[in-house]
Amino acid sequence: MNRLQKLFEKKPTGLLSIYYTAGYPKLNDTLTIAETLEKCGADFLEIGFPYSDPVADGPVIQASSKQALDSGMTLSVLFDQLKDLRKQVKIPILLMGYVNVMLQYGVESFCEKCKEVGVDGCIIPDLPMYEYEEMYRSTFEKYGLSNIFLVTPQTSEERIRKIDGLSNAFIYLVSSSATTGSNLSVSGSASAYFERISKMNLQTPVMIGFGISDKATYQAACNFASGAIIGSAFVKALDQNNLDQSIQNFMVQFKG
Amino acid sequence: MNYFVDERGYYGDFGGAYIPEMLYPNVEELRQKYQAIIDDEHFQAEFKALLKDYVGRPSPLYLAKRLSEKYGANIFLKREDLNHTGAHKINNTIGQILLAEKLGKKRIIAETGAGQHGVATATVCALRGLECVVYMGEVDIKRQAPNVARMKMLGATVVAATSGSKTLKDATNEAMRDWINNPVDTHYIIGSVVGPHPYPDMVAQFQSIISFETKKQLKEQTGSELADYVLACVGGGSNAMGMFYHFINDESVKLVAIEAAGKGVSSGFSAATTTLGKEGVLHGSRSILMQTDDGQVVEPHSVSAGLDYPGIGPQHAHLFKTGRGLYASITDDEALLAGRLLTQYEGIIPAIESAHAIAYLEKMTFKGGENVVICLSGRGDKDMETYMKYFNL
């Protein structure tokens, strides 16, 4: 059982997960940000490995990805930066990125390296369920990695059941039909969707992400899930001239 | 060997639907319904009527006599340049707009590079009275002002893609993001044989009218429906797939696809995907694409905006890998010279894209008497500024 599975085994509530882009704002900030976020109370982290064509992402994460790539971030550089990860950071870590980058690195090498540095799972939004199941699941499992699937308001019940069966940590509930960084209004339709999912009594816990930007949206999400994931709002708040302070200022609203 | 799509949406090692969950319901709806809609006799009747009366099909198959004498073979030009809006792109947009109507969609989005597919989409939206939003790279909007104006005059909204390199691949990303944000009422008309399954197959079927007509015309003109060679230029590859489609299983017909070498294959300014690319995933399908060792997509270069794309459709990748198709490349200079040559030998000013296919004649050797069909995918009006600069006209 990896760290992520252990965390969810305790049936926690109010979890806060933070996404940030590796190599942003500066190339070597990756590990520093992880350490600071852990100190500030984040429950687990998603570190994005950047891609040139991130179709599921809105402008904030696109821009951070581009800046990271321009600074020289690659998957090899990232694994190198993470080699002492587990000397410093205890909370679960996921890598998040697009399938082509993983394919070029080699799926087996990628999974092996994840295990070696202490990564617990992955979110690959454009890796289809069929391909995962047929081609990569056994490799992911061999190296103890959890693969996290996304569910949207349009995902059919049948498909959600299938995803539930393939998941072994949590399911990522995308709050609305949108790219990252849009604003969540926990209005009638969003609540109805979250309630519909709760009533399905899935075996896998869910986390809500996309559009979570402040205490109000975080708390609203926590009413329906084990917790919430914040990405764009955090990336936007990072100040490269005052990195530690900008992270603390952001986190205090949730964990103050 | 099966050269067509299988039930999983793959062509051999290529294809599939590598899309985020947010796009899954839209693409799945299409996947489940597209073939039944296309096969429906009412759909076919409407599609064929529009191709005939609105697009002006069948497009002629023209035996280019002076060109034939020069190269020592019978060179036929499939005149897609004579279609309404000036290129083959309209075959696909007519098909997809009818399909979008059957799906009950009210809003159409599209990506465009040079603007040809954008114009073809805006045209069919005007024809059917549907809202139209076209994504176009900020850089391309500046380079292709007349086509931007045409789209606007047709009532479309042109949105600048300002991310990444601000060209075709980024316009495609933006269109996909729009679709993610508007999953219910919107249909995305992809302009080439790229994207997640079923797009490559659907677009190929709509473009297959090119080779369907060609076979009949060859039979009338030569006595045989088969040619020795069939040539077409390839960016994403929609005119080529339309030109190859009904010849693919006729293994005696040599299929030749011409990519854009840009300033030269090793110059760093090229779009010769099969030479420079590796297998990977771009815009929702597994194919061959130009990328760094880290899997980042590389910005291509070609003088012709329509070939300036870092990938090729998955069916092309399959034809390449299995050896069924020959994939070659032609430089900017060679294409421009061939454009002038065709103009002065036959009185036809070709699009620079199509001129790449013409240019390949220089690299071929003929015994004499071979029948060669070249898809003249578009006319050169849009390229006059480039020709003027290059030849000091």
Image: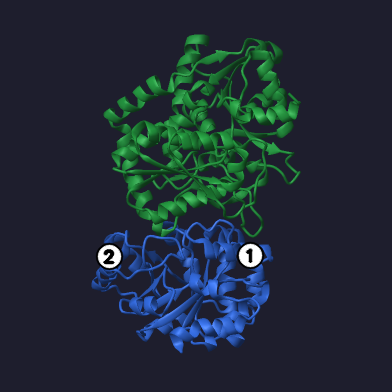
Label of residue A189 in the image: 2
- The answer to whether one can see residue A11 in this image is yes
Q: Residues within 10 Å of mark 1 (few under 14, many from 20)?
A: some
Residue B361 in picture, x, y percent from top left: 68, 23
Q: Hue of chain B?
A: green
Would you identify the image quadrant in which residue B106 lies?
top left
Label of residue A67 in the image: 1
User: Could you tell me which chain the residue with mark 2 belongs to?
Assistant: A
Q: Hey, which residue is sitting farthest left in the picture?
A: A199
Residue B68 in picture, x, y percent from top left: 65, 13
Closest to the observer: B163 or A88?
B163
Q: Hue of chain A?
A: blue
Q: Do labels 2 and 1 share a chain?
A: yes
Q: Is residue B16 left or right of residue B280?
A: left
Q: Is residue B69 left or right of residue A233?
A: right
User: Could you tell me which chain the residue with mark 1 belongs to?
Assistant: A
